[in-house]
Image (cartoon, rainbow, N blue to C red):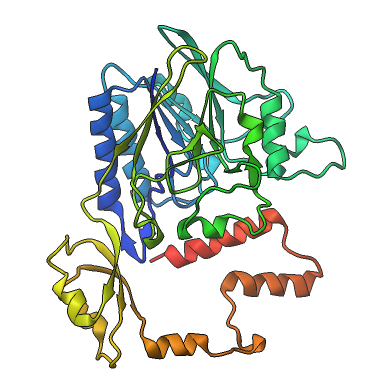
């Protein structure tokens, strides 16, 4: 069985105030083209479909167009979608019953009571059934009904409790689609700036891969870089687009796997996706940076660091004549480095909005923010930063 694994579409996201509508439509169209070329048996989308819990009308239109094109492929390809931490389950599941007629299956909440189980989709090939289990983003508070009275639980315990309730036939092939921060023991996966606001310090939101090892493949979403965690068959597909300068070196694409018979090696392939506008950084003097404008696409999203020792008059204005989408202009020279090296009194440190509110909350309530409150606050701050 050939499987396309993608995640973290973040439809509606902006990049330093630039609207990414054109780039997102382009990359989703390329995913459609690759589906026509490779003819996967199923497409998995592992969460963060939208960038905000309340998507714009424009974001709805982009997703609608993408799903309509997928539904029109013949022969039809099942599409399995879960909600991520950026998604509103209520909004994402809208018209989900209707979409199932086009073999588009959406799961947005973990089991809401003790009688419910994970959404399970069974597909078959020449080797028999493949069981797909859909596990949307899960916070401990979402599944507290599964815990014993008075028992507190972390993210690992929450996810483990949900999975342990499933009757998994280990004689058949089983695939889990999940959206969490997975680790392997003390080994953490690679992260980037795009995710920092949603990953808690100290790993309190981490889930160890030991609770998903019984699956034949684990299709993960949440992190923006394609990578495996602990085992080759436990994988993040990464985003199809670059969503920050920290993702500059990422090779974006579709993770394609081929499942053979039970207990046979899985084949892995990364199908590259390249947007017309790249995200990259440039470092040099003003003259050097201007001279490099013709070497690559001047329409790329660029972060520029200038190394001139002399003061420059309005460098941004000069650079805009050569680069159409400047994300930021920084100055890095002896003067700025010496300022950074100067000792600073702790009282003079400038805290970010997250730290300021956290200290305010502690002072007013005489207790720290809870895990869920901290995540909600981080999402709000991220949304404000990315709003026009």
Where residue 275 sits in the image (x, y, percent)? 25, 49
Can you tell which quarter of the image residue 148 is in? top right
Q: Is residue 277 visible?
A: yes
Whether residue 379 appears in this view of the structure is no
Quarter placement of the C terminus: bottom left
Q: What number of labels is visible?
A: 0
**On the rendered image, what quadrant is the N terminus found in?**
top left
**Picture quarter containing residue 297?**
bottom left
Kindly identify the residue that appears in the image at 72 percent across and 62 percent down: 369
**Is 22 located above or below residue 281 in the figure?**
above
Q: Nearer the viewer, residue 19 or 101?
A: 19
Question: Is residue 386 toward the left or the right of residue 161 in the image?
Answer: left
Between 248 and 319, the one nearer to me in the picture: 248
The correct choice, above or below, for 185 with respect to 166 in the image is below
| Residue at far right of view | 150
At x 69% / y 55%, what residue is drawn? 371
Q: Is residue 343 above or below residue 151?
A: below
Tell me which corner region of the image, top left, top right, bottom left or bottom right, holds residue 117. Answer: top right
Q: Position of residue 305 (x, y in %)?
A: 32, 76
Residue lying at 29% horizontally and 93% vertically, measured from the top left: 311
Relative depth, front residue between 287 and 329: 287
Horizontal and vertical percent for residue 191? 50, 53
Task: Answer left or right for 154 relative to 322.
Answer: right
Image spot of residue 68 (x, y percent): 30, 31
């Amino acid at each position: 069985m050939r499987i396309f694994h993608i995640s973290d579409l973040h439809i509606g996201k902006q990049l330093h105030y630039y609207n990414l509508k054109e780039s997102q439509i382009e990359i989703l169209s390329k995913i459609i083209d690759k589906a026509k070329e490779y003819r996967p048996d199923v497409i998995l989308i592992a969460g963060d479909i939208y960038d905000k819990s309340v998507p714009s009308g424009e974001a709805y239109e982009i997703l609608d167009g993408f799903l309509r094109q997928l539904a029109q492929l013949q022969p039809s390809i099942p599409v399995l979608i879960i909600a991520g931490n950026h998604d509103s389950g209520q909004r994402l599941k809208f018209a989900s019953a209707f979409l199932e007629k086009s073999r588009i299956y959406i799961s947005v909440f973990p089991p809401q009571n003790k009688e419910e189980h994970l959404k399970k989709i069974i597909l078959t090939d020449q080797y028999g059934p493949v069981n797909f289990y859909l596990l949307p983003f899960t916070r401990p508070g979402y599944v507290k009904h599964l815990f014993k009275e008075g028992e507190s639980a972390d993210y690992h315990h929450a996810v483990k409790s949900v999975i342990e309730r499933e009757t998994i036939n280990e004689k058949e092939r089983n695939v889990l689609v999940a959206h969490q921060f997975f680790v392997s023991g003390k080994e953490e996966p690679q992260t980037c700036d795009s995710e920092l606001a949603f990953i808690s310090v100290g790993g309190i939101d981490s889930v160890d891969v030991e609770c998903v090892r019984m699956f034949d493949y684990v299709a993960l979403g949440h992190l923006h870089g394609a990578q495996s965690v602990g085992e080759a068959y436990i994988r993040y597909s990464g985003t199809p687009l670059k969503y920050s300068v920290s993702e500059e070196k990422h090779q974006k694409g579709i993770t394609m796997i081929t499942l053979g018979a039970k207990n046979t090696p899985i084949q892995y392939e990364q199908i590259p996706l390249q947007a017309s506008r790249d995200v990259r950084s440039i470092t040099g003097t003003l003259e050097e940076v201007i001279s490099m404008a013709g070497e690559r696409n001047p329409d790329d999203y660029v972060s520029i660091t200038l190394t001139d020792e002399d003061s420059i008059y309005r460098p941004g204005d000069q650079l805009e004549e050569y680069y159409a989408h400047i994300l930021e202009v920084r100055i890095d020279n002896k003067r700025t480095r010496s300022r950074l090296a100067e000792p600073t009194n702790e009282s003079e440190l400038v805290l970010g909005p997250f730290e300021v509110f956290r200290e305010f909350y502690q002072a007013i309530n005489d207790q720290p923010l809870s895990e869920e409150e901290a995540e909600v606050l981080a999402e709000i701050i991220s949304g404000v930063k990315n709003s026009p």
